[in-house]
């Protein structure tokens, strides 16, 4: 019998996320659940902090609605890390008490709660007329929705080559809000993007990881910025996951969170594309354990490397 709080038997909605965090906090009362702000529809964008160290690692998931599997994966890791710390455990040679003491891990498990709820057909949204003029025409394929509730791709809304991203997407015929790839009317037009930027400015992270899907790839660079140890850390993440350390193609190289972080902070930032499945669709729930086994150690390596920055 699986005694874990985090289950992998249902598509991972925002409500499940909230409930899971309440139960985790009851079981492990030594961490706090807070909010970085609210989404477009007023949902709290939750964050938690694990550890008490001066070094700060930021992990975020579900910028994209149909990539809700990333939220489930980071919640699986959160439970594992809490278990290990409570039991004074060691993980593959990593001293968990030491990591906890030296690194603070900030996690936003669902950047885009409105989009995830829409993608997973939450009744509160489907029965609501707000922004329905944007998403209503796509109702038959709403499970593939990638954007936020306003039809903006949040990971194309950051001010790091945003104008280039807009130009590139216009060349592909994307000129209005929709299911994916619309960068917005201007950079930082969305509440979710503003909240992540303000959160980053507040804590001045030493390293960031953005979980996306899919492709089993790790993106580590932005343009020609030379970030100390960024490639070397990336190779370590590659080694333990089997994912390929690579660079995105030109048309995908701008206006993402990683891009903005690298440009503004000159510190290591990574996009991890988890799993493999059908292009443009959510990863299948039955792959949750398989994917987690691929990336579990990657998180511990990231914490260890952040400690050294």
Image: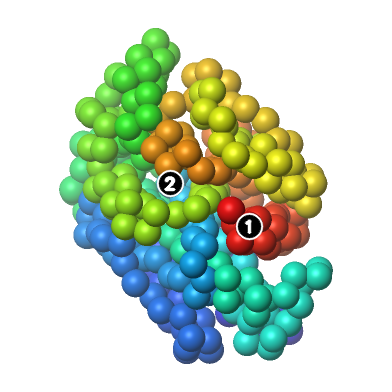
Q: Is residue 107 above or below residue 148?
A: below
Please give the residue where the numbered disc 2 appears in the rendered image: 63
Asked if the residue under mark 1 is in contact with the one under mark 2, i.e. CB atoms within 8 Å, the reply is no
Residue sitting at x 46%, y 80%: 31
For this rendering, which residue is in front, 236 or 13?
236
Residue sitting at x 50%, y 53%: 206
Q: Which one is in front in this view, the residue at disc 2 or the one at disc 1?
A: 1
Report crowding for label 2: few under 14, some 14 to 19, many 20 or more residues within 10 A (C-alpha): many
Kindly give the residue lying farthest to the top in the view shown: 171
Tell me the element at label 1: helix
Q: Is residue 193 above or below residue 48?
A: above
Residue 276 seen anywhere in this rendered image of the structure: no
Please give the residue where the numbered disc 1 appears in the rendered image: 308
Position of 52 compared to 14: left or right? right
Task: Where is residue 226? Give x, y as percent.
Answer: 56, 30
| CA separation in Å, label 2 and label 1 | 28 Å
For this rendering, which residue is in front, 107 or 290?
107
Task: Where is residue 11? Give x, y as percent.
Answer: 53, 60
Tell me the element at label 2: loop
Colour basis: rainbow
| Quadrant of the rendered image containing residue 86 | bottom right
Position of 48 compared to 105: left or right? left
For this rendering, which residue is in front, 165 or 171?
165
Residue sitting at x 57%, y 21%: 249
Q: In which quadrant of the rendered image does the N terminus lie? A: bottom right
Task: Where is residue 103? Give x, y as percent.
Answer: 55, 67
Residue 197 seen anywhere in this rendered image of the structure: yes
């Amino acid at each position: 019998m699986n005694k874990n709080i985090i289950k992998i038997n249902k598509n991972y909605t925002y409500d499940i996320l909230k409930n899971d965090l309440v139960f985790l906090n009851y079981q492990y009362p030594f961490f706090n659940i807070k909010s970085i702000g609210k989404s477009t529809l007023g949902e709290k964008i939750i964050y938690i902090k694990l550890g008490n160290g001066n070094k700060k690692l930021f992990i975020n998931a579900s910028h994209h609605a149909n990539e809700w599997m990333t939220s489930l994966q980071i919640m699986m890791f959160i439970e594992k890390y809490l278990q290990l710390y409570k039991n004074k455990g060691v993980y593959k040679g990593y001293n968990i008490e030491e990591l906890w003491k030296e690194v603070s891990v900030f996690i936003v498990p669902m950047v885009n709660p409105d989009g995830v709820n829409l993608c997973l057909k939450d009744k509160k949204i489907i029965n609501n007329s707000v922004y329905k003029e944007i998403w209503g025409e796509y109702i038959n394929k709403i499970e593939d929705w990638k954007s936020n509730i306003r039809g903006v791709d949040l990971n194309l809304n950051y001010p790091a080559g945003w104008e280039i991203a807009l130009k590139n997407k216009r060349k592909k015929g994307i000129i209005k809000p929709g299911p994916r790839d619309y960068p917005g009317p201007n950079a930082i037009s969305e509440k979710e993007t503003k909240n992540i930027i303000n959160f980053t400015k507040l804590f001045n992270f030493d390293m960031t990881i953005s979980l996306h899907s899919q492709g089993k790839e790790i993106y580590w660079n932005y343009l020609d910025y030379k970030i100390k140890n960024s490639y070397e850390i990336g190779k370590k993440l590659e080694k333990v996951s089997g994912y390929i350390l690579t660079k995105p193609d030109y048309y995908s190289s701008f206006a993402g969170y990683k891009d903005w972080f690298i440009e503004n902070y000159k510190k290591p930032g990574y996009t991890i594309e988890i799993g493999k499945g059908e292009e443009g669709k959510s990863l299948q729930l039955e792959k949750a354990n398989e994917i987690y086994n691929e990336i579990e150690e990657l998180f511990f390596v990231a914490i260890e490397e952040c400690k050294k920055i």
